[in-house]
Amino acid sequence: MAPFTNIRFQSGEQFKMSDLFALWFVEKIMQQILLASTSIYRQQLLEKLHLPFICAAPQTDETPLPGENAEALVLRLAAAKAQSLALSYPDHLIIGSDQVCVINGNITGKPHTVDNACKQLHHASGQRVTFYTGLALYNSRSRQLQTLCEPFHVHFRELTASEIATYVEREQPLNCAGSFKSEGLGIALFQQLEGRDPNTLIGLPLIALLAMLRVEGINPLA
C-alpha cells in the first residue's frame, strides 16, 4: 500500500492521502510557475527558490517608445513578456523580467558585439551606473498583474583599455545589459554595489518576486 501524505490547506485543515494521489491533487489545485525567459542566468536564480517551474521564450518587441524613460520601459516590457505567453499557458503564474542600464542619463541595453561591449565599459569606467530591472508576475487564470521596477547601482572603478579588452574577450558579455556578468569575472570591474537585492543585477529580483508569489498564495517556506 502506498504511504500516506498530509495535505495542509491555507485554512489549516489537513487531509491524508496516498503519495500518488497527493501529487495528482497538488498538480490540479496549484498553478504552475512559468518563467518567460530562456536566460540560463534567470533560470539559475529561480532555482534558488526550490519551486518547480518551466520556461518559454516570450514574443515581445523590445523597441523603446519615443520619450520612454528607463523605468517605464522595463515595466512595460516585463509585463509584455509575461502576458505574451498567456494564451499558450492559460493557467500559469508567468514571470516576466527586463533590464536596462543608464550611463550618464543614456539608456543602454545589450551590446550584441565585442566593439559595443568595449564602448559600454569605457563609458561606464569611473561612473555610477544605475540598472533598472522590471519584474512582472501575471496570473493567466485570474488576469491579475503585479509589476515592480527594482533599481540597483554599480560604481565602476577606473578601467584601462587593456582591462576592458581582456574582460570582454574572456567573458563575452554580449547579451548582458551593461556588458558584464556580475556572477562571474565582472565583479573585478566594480568599486562598490548599492541595492537591496544583488540578484537584481543578474536579472531577476528574488526578494520582490517572493513577495508577489506570496500574494498568489505561494511561499517556498510554507
Image (cartoon, rainbow, N blue to C red):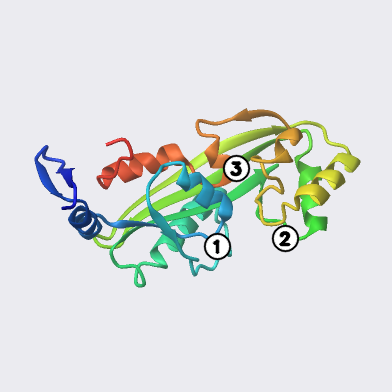
**Crowdedness of circle 2 by 10 Å Cα count: few (<14), some, many (20+)?**
some
Quick one: label 2 or label 3, which is nearer the N terminus? Answer: 2
Q: Residue furthest top?
A: 192
Residue type for callout 2 = His
Mark-to-mark CA distance, 2 and 3 = 18 Å
For label 3, the SS is strand
Quickly name the residue at label 2: 112
> What residue appears at the point 11 percent right and 37 percent down from the top-left corner?
12
* 201 left or right of 139 in image: right
Quick one: label 1 or label 3, which is nearer the N terminus? Answer: 1
Mark-to-mark CA distance, 1 and 2 = 21 Å
Can you tell which mark lies on residue 221? none
Please say if the residues under marks 1 and 3 sit with CB atoms less than 8 Å apart. Answer: no
* 172 left or right of 81 in image: right
Q: Is residue 178 above or below residue 90?
A: above
Can you tell which mark lies on residue 65? 1
Residue 64 at x, y = what percent? 57, 61
Residue 49 at x, y = what percent? 41, 42
Can you tell which mark lies on residue 131? 3
For label 1, the SS is loop
